[in-house]
Image (cartoon, grey):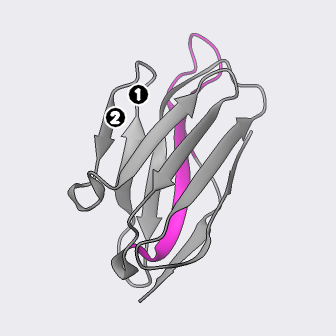
Amino acid sequence: VQLQASGGGLVQTGGYLRLSCVASGSIWSIDGMGWYRQTPGERRELVAIMDADGTADYAESVKGRFTISRDEAEKSVYLQMNSLKPEDTAVYYCAAELNFCPTVRRTSYWGRGTLVTVSS
């Protein structure tokens, strides 16, 4: 089982990026799926997460700028990041609560991070 994230890079203030994450392996279904970020010396923080029913939750700092979406068939989650600011610079991690069968549920998995750098 693997979560593969992509889409990070270098962008100027006010620019945009789209992060993608695909889950692969013997997965029965996925509950929550979302994005966290971390800067050196800081704790990993939630950026956005979406439940299987489409309910989304965002960090206050990204509301109105970032949009999370999912493709259940592709077992993917996306993060559209607009109006980027230097303080959005971080390593972004994809995370998911995976269900492997009806009795093995909500196992947390993390992908490798993808670096987002916003220059001022």
Residue farthest toward the left in the current orientation of the protein: 60
Q: Residue at horizontal 34%, vertical 78%?
A: 87
Residue 2 occupies quadrant? top right
Measured as percent of width and height from the top left, residue 98 is found at 58, 30
Asked if 114 appears above or below 101 in the picture, the reply is: below
**Which residue is denoted by mark 1 in the rendering?**
51
Measured as percent of width and height from the top left, residue 50 is found at 41, 34
Residue farthest toward the front in the current orientation of the protein: 14
Q: Which residues are magenta?
A: 88-109
As helix, strand or loop, the secondary structure at mark 1 comes to loop
Please tell me which residue lies in front, 110 or 6: 6
Q: CA distance from mark 1 to mark 2?
A: 6 Å
Asked if 61 appears above or below 102 in the picture, the reply is: below
Residue farthest toward the top in the current orientation of the protein: 102
Mark 2 residue type: Ala
Mark 1 residue type: Asp
* Label 1 packing within 10 angstroms: few (<14), some (14-19), many (20+): some
Asked whether the residues under the numbered discs 1 and 2 touch, taking CB atoms below 8 Å apart as contact, a structural biologist would say yes
**Which residue is denoted by mark 2 in the rendering?**
56
Judge whether residue 89 is colored magenta.
yes
